[in-house]
Amino acid sequence: MCGVIGVMGHPRAVYLSYLGLRRLQPRGQESAGIVATDGESLVQKRGMGHVKDVFTDAEITNWPAHAAIGHNRYSTAGDSTIDEAQPFMQQTKFGKVAICHNGHLPHTAEQARQLLASGHGLVSTSDTAVVLGLLSQSEKDNVVDAFIDALSQVEGAYTMLLLTRDKLVAARDPYGFRPLALGKLDEGWVVASETAAFQLFEGKYEREVLPGEVLILTRDQAPQSLYPFPTTQPAECLFEHVYFARPDSKVFGSPVSSERLRMGRRLAQEHPVSADVVVGIPDSGMGAAFGFHEESKIPLRLGLTRDHHMGRTFIDPNYEIRGLKVKYKLSPVPDLLDGQRVVLVDDSIVRGNTIMEIIEMVRKAGAREVHVRSSSPPVISPCYQGIDTKSKDELIAAHLTIEEIGREIGADSLGYLSREGLLWAVGDPEGKRHCTSCFTGVYPIRVEGGTSKNQHEMVST
Ligand code: AMP
């Protein structure tokens, strides 16, 4: 998962991109970068780690530019080094071009080999570099057509931003796996993975960049949209609604917090339980916990506290503390848990390790019963569309029944929101707009070891 932002036509383009990247920090913490243009040349700054550590105040305020793109990385392909930090920048026959990407292109290895064999260098080992490679060797005579030409040769998930001296081009793959919102600024335009990125500087939400849309932003003209790819049934990521997107964002056009409330309400209808308190697991389980509480009328208590100040975990190899990683982040409130029948609500269970540690922690704090409710269905299959989910071997629900999982994690009862319930909560009851592959193992695109719906073969235009 990654975060992208682009600003066009604003005198503080770098500063706004920086603020937006800080808001998008939860989407990726490995590296951050910005490329900006003053209309003459492109300048790049990238670094490993968090946005606030990569850029100095002086860099952000003294960088003259009217357009910029920025990226936070959470790798799904390629190494984790500074070479892989985005945006990438390359000299091409169209001049300098920069590119950044949220998504994953699972079939680019052969194209990378061919590009290298034919003497074209690649800026990095990642899938994104292949798009830049294909763009540079395209026979099209302008950069937008060459970008479209490159994209039409890849298959998978991409929300991509391209920056040249005078243009910012945003593209979403025809399935629309990853989100991208368009906002209007007091001067110019902004595009970002989530609306919270530009809410901060009062960007006005206009609309989603649509699946399959290529949107061209320039300083002086109105935005221009092209739809150059064959259309297909959209497959927007359900996990963005469940876990990834910030609660103060709209994602795919829908307000995330309201959706999470609905998930929790529906979860309480599907899996009612007699209990004394509902406790949400901070931060990602809180939205659904509120919904569960509203529907079930069981009191909601802040029985777990999230510690935002502990920083990185140092684990002493000579002194083992069970579940230290989880304990570092979360701390129980015994006064609210002691003697209680507790419903723990979380957004999802992936490997099962986190919830297992939390159940133990809550029991040690005196809970009499611990019932677990997950606001996503069981995750049974890996994601090849831009989320770094674990391999199938590590997914607890890929191997055990729900009853077995309940026993394994030590819960008195366990309930998962149904797929129908989740689709209902995100306003797509017939499942016409969303990817459900991590819950079904059926993928909209070709993947190794998975079933493909083969909805559409992508072809070159
Ligand atoms: P575990 O079951 O131990 O793998 O951890 C599951 C928890 O990690 C969930 O409650 C989420 O809050 C969070 N989570 C879910 N998916 C991801 C992901 N792809 N990357 C990082 N954290 C995740």
Image: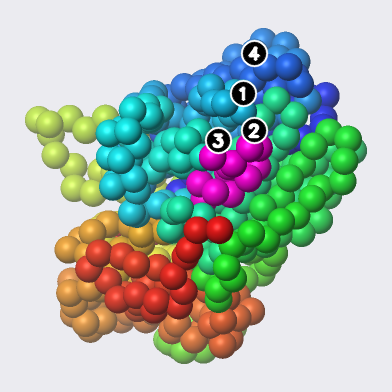
Name the amino acid, label 4.
Glu
* Image point (56%, 87%), residue name: 430
Decide which of tag 2 and tag 1 comes sooner along the chain: 1
Q: Which structural element holds mark 4?
A: helix
Q: What residue is shown with label 4? A: 59
Main SS, magenta region, reads: helix
Relative vertical location of residue 211 with respect to residue 202 in this rendering, above or below? below
Image point (57%, 26%), residue name:
93
- Relative image position of residue 249 (x, y in whole percent): 66, 55
How far, Cα to Cα, is label 4 from label 3? 21 Å
Instruction: Tell me, yes or no, whether the two marked residues, 3 and 2, touch with CB atoms within 8 Å.
Output: yes
Residue topped by disc 3: 99
Element on which disc 2 rests = strand
Tag 3: amino acid: Ile
Identify the magenta region.
Answer: 139-151
Q: CA distance from mark 2 to mark 4?
A: 19 Å
What secondary structure is found at the residue carrying circle 1? Answer: strand
Q: Is residue 74 visible?
A: yes
Residue 112, by quadrant, is top left
**Mark-to-mark CA distance, 3 and 2:** 6 Å
Instruction: Name the mark nearer the viewer: 3 or 1.
Output: 1
Image check: 188 left or right of 344?
right
Q: Nearer the viewer, mark 4 or mark 3?
A: 3
Q: Amino acid at mark 1?
A: Gly
The amino acid marked with disc number 2 is Leu
Q: Which residue is mark 1?
A: 95
First of labels 3, 2 by sequence position = 3
The quarter of the image that holds ligand 1 is bottom left
Name the residue that disc number 2 marks. 163
Residue 195 sits above or below residue 399 on the image: above
Coloring applied to the structure: rainbow
Distance between the Cα atoms at labels 2 and 1?
11 Å
